[in-house]
Image (cartoon, rainbow, N blue to C red):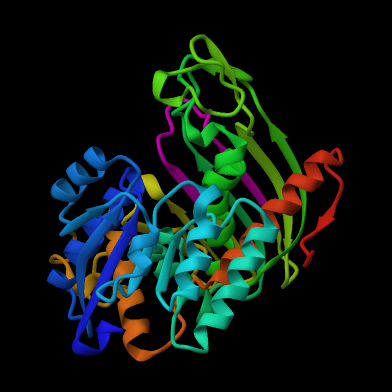
Amino acid sequence: MSQHDGRLGVGMVGYAFMGAAHSQAWRVAPRFFDLPLRPEMTVVAGRSADRVQAAAERLGWAEAETDWRRLLERDDVDVIDICTPGDTHAEIAVAALEAGKHVLCEKPLANSVAEAEEMVRAAESAAAGGARAMVGFTYRRVPAISLARELVAEGRLGQIRHVRAQYLQDWIADPDVPLSWRLDKQKAGSGALGDIGAHVVDLAQFITGEQITGVNGLLETFVHERPVAAEFSGLQGAAGEGRGAVTVDDAAVFFGRLSGGAVATFEATRFAWGRKNAIRIEINGSQGSLAFDFEDMNVLHYFDASDDARTAGFRRIVVTEPDHPYMAAWWPAGHGLGYEHGFVHQVVDLVHALAAGEQPTPSFADGLQVQRVLDAVERSAAAEGAWTPVTEQ
């Protein structure tokens, strides 16, 4: 691969919301961080020639292609960055790995456990030839979340007893919001469960260092039909003008148990008016607690149960000091970061792992574990909320 001459050629598939976020990350990371390889934004692929060319010019890619398979044939492309809907992840990732390319794939890893298992097998086989694969759970790389993981790993909370996690949005709370691919089960796999619930499942497992072993689940669709915008007239259940069927869940609520014995509650909804991107997680242990809310993303709240009762309380940690994860490369203390910085940190971690010949995290196996949790929630909901172990199928 051309990465041996110090460069790392990147080919990205997809150029919409996630493609824009990933593009900024590839542009910015080498300008703020001292990287062992030099990422180059070589080519972006999309189906529409005019749109992908415009995206390449706007986002900073050297070339544009209309067939992602051409990226696999190029010697100047080392990494395939997959920013497409979930129904295409498995095909692109497996083909890229078989071609000897490194892969970064957006979450959730796939639309089914079977697809995710196929992707893990491809990643394990490709690793023998030096190709690596990572799934993009970028919220892990918010400095406050990374600090939370460090505190738990240091034993500051003692034995973990409770996890409560929410991901609240309101972007489809209005029943007249039109259909999009995210509301089509064939393309998205699931609704709020996979789109945003996957994030809090991953964060719960990442921060605690434990895995969810079983769930009770409830899924609900509040609006079953929506207007069909012209650009989405080909979606499953849509019939041109008029209204089309919503084929995914609008909200997911589930209980869980972690491998260390802790109990957990999860809520994912896109119907919480006033909540734009509220990721909330609180963890209670035998010796203290942590609490985080993405709408105040530069702050972590920490309670130490050993403090004197007269002055005990949650400590508000502004996570902007040079000693905090990732922060030394950025601004003076007190100058906060934003949503896009998690993607930059993802690039930084990926490039360092590739240069060292190490497995980047989260791996495809980590993505499969999240997929199994999502699958268990769906199976539990279908069985009237029956307790469902998270097991290999």
Q: Is residue 390 left or right of residue 370?
A: right
In the rendered view, tell whether residue 230 sits above or below residue 300: above
Q: Is residue 174 visible?
A: yes
Q: Residue at the spot x=30%, y=40% of the render?
A: 48
Q: Position of residue 390 (x, y in %)?
A: 77, 62
Q: Is residue 305 visible?
A: no
Q: Residue at the spot x=40%, y=24% of the render?
A: 231
Residue 269, magenta (yes or no): yes
Image-quadrant location for residue 5: bottom left
Q: Position of residue 6 (x, y in %)?
A: 19, 86
Depth check, front residue: 268 or 134: 134
Q: Position of residue 264 (x, y in %)?
A: 68, 55
Depth check, front residue: 31 or 71: 71
Residue span colored magenta: 264-281
In the rendered view, tell whether residue 147 sits above or below residue 19: below
For the image shown, how many numbered marks are present on the structure? 0
Q: Residue at the spot x=60%, y=72% of the render?
A: 120
Q: Position of residue 29 (x, y in %)?
A: 21, 68
Image quadrant containing the C terminus: bottom right
Q: Residue at the spot x=44%, y=81% of the render?
A: 131
